[in-house]
Amino acid sequence: TGIVIMAAFIQFQISREISSTLFWTMHPLHVMISALVTTAMYRLHSKGEIIPTIIIGYLGSVGIATLSDSIIPFAGEWLLNMPHRGVHLGFIEKWWLVNPLAFAGIALGYLRPKTKFSHAIHVFLSTWASLFHILMALGTSINVVTAILIAVFLFLAVWIPCCTSDIVFPLLWIKEGNGKHPISLSDGGV
């Protein structure tokens, strides 16, 4: 979906302001869904103690969503020398929006630990947030090579951090045999 949206925005010369509005909509939603999934995964496979769950839910969502939506796209913008590049750290710039949504996601993930549907939503929101971050940085024109490189940065920005935050990060903190659905490390972990 990211490539199709990018092509449409470029073709119809959609303004940077619209990309900015969409980024600041998608990024906080991405943080909330990431917090929900990260917390739910940890809760399902741990004893579910509240303080570690909150810490892991927050760091796994805000930290990794910031990497995915802001830092990796900014690296791409910088390497491609885009004219309007910027880091845009949501948990600082719009702390009043991003942080409460992270805690709402943590609460939802703690109370209703479901991961399958929310992981799919997480990947789409991450794709769109990363894309709109890059589209904010674009100038008025783009060539084929730049479009291909943007696609590569989108892939790096979405798949690696999202799978890490949803699956790997919360499970790093699990002791073998804990939780409702224990993970056997001797069987490969999953």
Image (cartoon, rainbow, N blue to C red):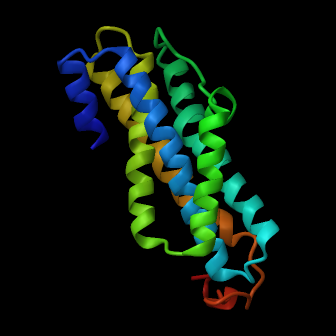
Left/right of residue 3 with respect to residue 103 in the rendered view: left
| Residue visible at 45% across and 63% down in the picture | 119
Q: Could you tell me residue 13's position as x and y percent?
A: 23, 14
- The quarter of the picture where residue 75 lies is top right
Q: Nearer the viewer, residue 131 or 52?
A: 52
Outermost residue toward the right in this view: 51
- Of residues 93 and 130, the one nearer the viewer is 93
Residue found at x 22% / y 28%: 7
In which quadrant is the N terminus drawn? top left
Q: Above or below — where is 128 with respect to 38?
A: above
How many discs appear? 0
Q: Position of residue 110 (x, y in %)?
A: 63, 71
**Residue at image point 47% right, 18% down:** 80
Q: Residue at x 67, y 72 (%)?
A: 171
Left or right, 85 with respect to 151, comes to right
* Residue 110 visible, this angle: yes
Q: Quadrant of the C terminus?
A: bottom right
In the rendered view, tell whether residue 80 sits above or below residue 159: above
Q: Is residue 165 visible?
A: no
Residue 27, above or below 143: below
* Residue sitting nearer the eye, 149 or 178: 178
In the figure, 18 relative to 117: above or below?
Answer: above
Across and down, in percent, residue 167 comes to 57, 67
Please state the horizontal and vertical placement of residue 2, each as a whole percent of the image: 31, 39
Is 181 positioned to the left or the right of 73 in the image?
Answer: right
